[in-house]
Amino acid sequence: MVATADGVKYPPEWLVKHSNVTVEEKLDELRGLMGKAEGDPVRIVGVGAGAWGSVFVAMLQDSYGHFRDQAVVRIWRRSGRPVDRATAEHLFEVINSREDVLRRLIRRCAYLKYVEARLGDRILFADEILRDGFCLNMIDTPLCPLKVVTNLQEAVWDADIVVNGLPSTETSVVFEEISRYWRDRKTMPIIISLSKGVEAELVPEPRIVTPTQMIQRATGALVENILYLGGPNIASEIYNKEYANARLCGAEKWRKPLAKFLRQPHFIVWDNGDLVTHEVMGGLKNVYAIGAGMVAGLTNESATSKSVYFAHCTSEMIFITHLLAEEPEKLAGPLLADTYVTLLKGRNAWYGQKLAKGELNLEMGDSIKGRGMIQGVSAVKAFYELLSQASLSIKHPEEDRCIVPVQLCPILRILYSILIKREFPPQAILEALRDETMDDPRERIEIAQTHAFYKPFLLGQQHSSVNGTIL
């Protein structure tokens, strides 16, 4: 076994396969597929600089940024957001605890401004510190320096690959603006969406809108050029080279070569054709992660209580995906792992736990300092309101009457009552779990698998689907 620079030991044959030569070959292969001429670099742009969006772009910069004539990696974020004094003080502590970061800033003549900010003599800005490798939502994990662009037009007008790191609540607005800068383009870029959230539209008919659909609607890009990447990804852990995997979902034309391009020694990317299930699950898991955090906080991390909750919430997730896709991908592999890690440690679970312990309250909103947007809150509202529509009524599995689908989702109902209507405190989620009339989760899964409830129009589908891909 041979140790690499990151301290991880790999077999010699593995190192040969994943050497720098292989990285260059992957870049050359992608350039060839894009028809890039010599001296014309692949331009990769991240849009949005939250924790995962920043880490994803930083990994690409680490891998391909030194091939300057062949690849250019940048990230866009809005300018003007100040860093408060407390964050500046904490950032200064982080810098001084990391010798490599300290030396880097001194070499770049960038250290003094952090001293001044620590003393309160200067205000730092989020785009400014991102250039030095500090994401405002993830101060404790320094990244590599990034090329930051604050003008959206400058960032995207000539991009070959755009990485959407925006929350679902901002995706439509930003990509509608981007579409204006692409009007004169002969070819549209490839878009990889990292966004894990959904929105609901209730008129003219109820439907769920995923981030890739928002992007397609805003830009008119071909569906085959828009992909979704999801998996068990805790941003700070991945940048610290904890082993992880993900799936790149979408049409075969680009998902296979891009999965190969994105794969790294500690970040394995597979490809999958079922974009619908993966993207919907990406939004759904945030819904149920808030409840998982509440259960953990209220029961002192009781493994039994958390496992009971996990059984019920995953059965609801399976039920909901069967409303949206005729043959959804099974909740297994990276799809299950993504759900598990989000319920265990993601920002939505953290938010639910803080609510349960009284350390946060709903009046603070769903954009939390140092954590960013808690997308599960808007997703609770979206899924509840969508599945409450009378036009979606289904036959009760045991009684001779019709019900709306949300009636078969007791966890979603109680989360809506706690988070949106604010009728009950977080403790109500435990009462819901202990309801003696609650059905066995297996029964809900069996109901879903009968295909009797499939509603193709919920995703704007007019015809049948194959592996979740709209025809």
Image: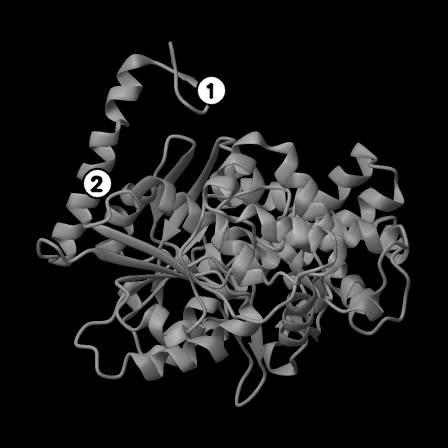
Within 10 Å of the Cα at label 1, are there few (<14), some (14-19), or many (20+) other Cα atoms?
few
Q: Quadrant of the C terminus?
A: bottom left
| Residue 399 x/y as whole percent | 73, 66
Residue drawn 36% across the image and 46% down it: 60
- Can you say whether 387 is above or below 352 in the image? below
**In the rendering, at what x and y percent does residue 88 appear?**
69, 53
Q: Residue 26, which numbered label? A: 2
Per the image, the residue denoted by label 1 is 7
- At label 2, counting other C-alpha atoms closer than 10 Å, the crowd grade (few under 14, some 14-19, many 20 or more) is some
* Image quadrant in which you'd find residue 157: bottom left
Three-letter code, disc 2: Lys
**Considering only order in the chain, which callout, 1 or 2, is on the residue closer to the N terminus?**
1
Circle 1: residue type: Gly
Q: Secondary structure at mark 2?
A: helix
The quarter in which the N terminus is drawn is: top left
Q: In the current view of this chain or complex, which residue is farthest to the bottom?
A: 204
Residue plotted at (14% across, 53% down): 33
- Give the quadrant of residue 212: bottom left
Mark 2–mark 1 Cα distance, whole angstroms, equals 24 Å
User: Is any atom of residue 462 visible in this view?
Assistant: no
Q: Kindly state the secondary structure of the residue where label 1 is placed.
A: loop
* Residue at x 87%, y 54% (from the top left corner): 359
Q: Is residue 197 left or right of residue 463?
A: right
